[in-house]
Image (spheres, rainbow, N blue to C red):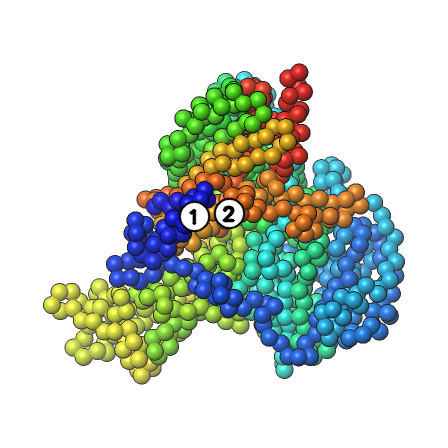
Amino acid sequence: MRTLTKLDGDSSRARRELHDHIQGSGPLARHTVDSHGQRQAGASSFHESAEKHVTGKATYIDDIKTPQDALYVALGLSPVAHGTLTKLELDAVRQAPGVVDVITLHDVPGHTDIGPVFPGDPIFVDQEISYAGQCLFAVAATSLQAARQAVKLATLHIDEQPASLDPVAAAGRQEVVRPTHVQERGDWQTTLQQAEQTIEGELFIGGQEHFYLESQACIVVPTEDEGVMVHTSNQHPSETQKLVAEVLGIPFHAVTVEVRRMGGGFGGKETQASPWACIAAIIARRTGKATRLRLPRSEDMRATGKRHPFHNRYQLAIDAQGVIKGGDITVIGDCGYSPDLSDAIVDRAMFHADNAYSLGDARVTGHRAKTHTASNTAFRGFGGPQGMMIIEAAMDDIARRVGEDPLTIRKRNFYREGRDTTHYGQQVDQKQLLHTLVDTLETSSDYWARRQHIRDYNAASPVIKKGLALTPVKFGISFTAQHLNQAGALLHVYTDGSIMINHGGTEMGQGLHTKICQVVARELGLDLDSVRISATRTDKVPNTSPTAASSGADLNGMAARDAASKLRERLFEFAAGHFEGGLDREGMRLEHGMLIAGIGESERRIPWGELVQTAYLNRVSLSEKGFYATPLIHYNRATGQGRPFYYYAFGAAVAEVSVDTLSGEYLVDRVDVLHDVGNSLNPAIDIGQVEGGFIQGMGWLTSEELKWNAKGVLVSDGPATYKIPTYGDLPKVFNVDLLEGHPNSMASLYRSKAVGEPPFMLGMCVWSALRDALASLADYRVSPHLDTPATPERVMLTANAIRNKAL
């Protein structure tokens, strides 16, 4: 399928094409609807809340109405990164106008440590302060302004101590949040010793702020049974239910958590939405009043974790053709002050240190460094992007060493027959798609003709240099924690034939709910309008996994399909024995709002509404639950070997950039993307995910720079100092294709593939293209060192270093 988005003055045409595409007319209509206009799974359809989004009717946490006597919470945060809280004077806070309650660690009735996986996250500071922005106390008042004014009246007595901010030094001192882990395959030491040549390098990879549009927010309402109802912007309702219950000292069933939608999550609301719900729940139970808590942007950025910054290095054995024979890769994740999800995140960085390339005999080591910053957490890609960056840097470095084009070196090192097993022991299925994607994109993007044009251009242009790069992506799909690979769903059919589906996944704008509705519509042969989805609630589907790891549609879609198919079979069995004359059970099907039995002249059709009504009158259950657990996956942490992923998703992207080598400023002139989603569940939504993921990945590697001062205080704490990509940063030409004709080889949902995280890493091509442009300053004989984010300052300094070395 070809979807072309051009941002070069032809945007009106692009909008018309997209409208035609979704409406089912125009040249793209073959992917839009089936022949009867039913927008089921596999067809493009608008996001189920699209109209609500653009009209302002979509309800977010701040839109939920609460009683007039609801309380508002403000937080007292630590101004220092490391020290000891010796005294906390709060009398003036308690006496401030409008203040109803003030709580500290000593007011917590139950658990005080709310670490999501491992301990280490106190809900409030007791004595030791571990980062600037850590929560010391909370104030509840009759208005938000009163609460915020009262917080300022606190007197803090802190014995400030030096902050540890260097993860490399921390790892060297064995200051880690979790033990070091190693994966290795073959005799990598001998391979390095006997290599024709070796190459080595290192790279700092910056972190990233989630910058969701809706900051961390929740409303907690006390209930009559000594429990609480929690409305939260949250990717993991079941974990929040557990932590709130433990903090309050009550059973899990006394806590209900509801999530209708989020204004963005990107991983930042997987674990780090829970602390605020716990604080609000304590106040709600103490006061008996509904309690609202929402972090202002600057507090959100200081109090919550980011994408992990990484320091990575490699030493590789290569032959004269630049083919990797083996090597040693080390990744050091800056985890912040506590474990949070860092064990799994650094694991995934290790799993993806190969990206699309066979490492041969290799060792990959992962360190989890402890520093005095907010505990870093999940972010789209979950460590995978940071792991991939070191091998992509190596591909460029090898190319300069052996005098070949980087694309040639990448293709020589792809997984292939005979070399298709990763360093952690998993065989790469559908590895041929890497070659198919890259070969197709190489041709469609005119790579080699543009390469020659760019070389000619650069030879004649002393200041403005162009760069070109094509980079691939191989991303494993599944939670690396095996037990999280499960999901449930609850399906109700009402007597008018309408359907309500609920599942354990959460909607953060990615279109998950839309796809689930399409799955149910497809299984029951109905139009999408017949299916509605309700909020994610812990009292409907219990013990759910987070909506993360690109698994939302895979897991919850299969659970919804299980529920719908079981209900369908029950209706078939009923219909076969009930309707006059009997119906042929063999070949019975639901299509176009009809139960169809038989063929030809003996065919009988019963409208869906009539079938449902008749089943109800005959006391046939019209409700069903579904469940799914991903098969095959396993990983032995003791040996560092296994099959942690059910399958791999692939992609490739080409970027062309223009760089002013005197100022460091640059433009992304053109991007071409070809991405593998198997049989797409919804091409329109999937294309949007590819586009959005690419731009977010590009921002991570170019403009989004996190800055702390020497004392460990975050200074890039708002949009004035932290630069996410804007409309003006988009590529002038942005071509996005979905790979067709290559369904998932595994038994996934309709042979589709996940699309949430893999496109993020396509943005690596922009960074590689910047390096390519800088390499032209030395006639492509050197490989520029360019840490990320590759801001104009870093680009300028690198250009100056190359020029100075040439002199």
| Residue 753 tag number | none
Q: Is residue 641 at least partly visible in the picture? A: no
Residue that appears at 39% across and 44% down: 4
Say what secondary structure mark 2 lies in: helix
Say what secondary structure mark 1 lies in: helix
The front one of 94 and 113 is 94
* Residue 430 horizontal/vertical position (percent): 39, 40
* Residue 782 horizontal/vertical position (percent): 58, 21
Q: Which residue is mark 1?
A: 11
Q: Is residue 394 above or below residue 241?
A: above
Residue that appears at 84% across and 64% down: 154
Categorize mark 1 by other alpha carbons within 10 Å: few (<14), some (14-19), many (20+): few
* Residue 787 horizontal/vertical position (percent): 63, 34
Residue that appears at 74% across and 63% down: 75
* Residue 408 horizontal/vertical position (percent): 45, 26
**Quadrant hosting residue 232:** bottom right
Q: Is residue 451 at least partly visible in the picture? A: yes
Q: Which residue is mark 2?
A: 693
Q: Comparing marks 1 and 2, which lies closer to the viewer?
A: 1
Give the tally of numbered discs.
Answer: 2
Kind of residue sitting beneath label 1: Ser
Q: Please identify the residue farthest to the left as the structure is shown.
A: 601
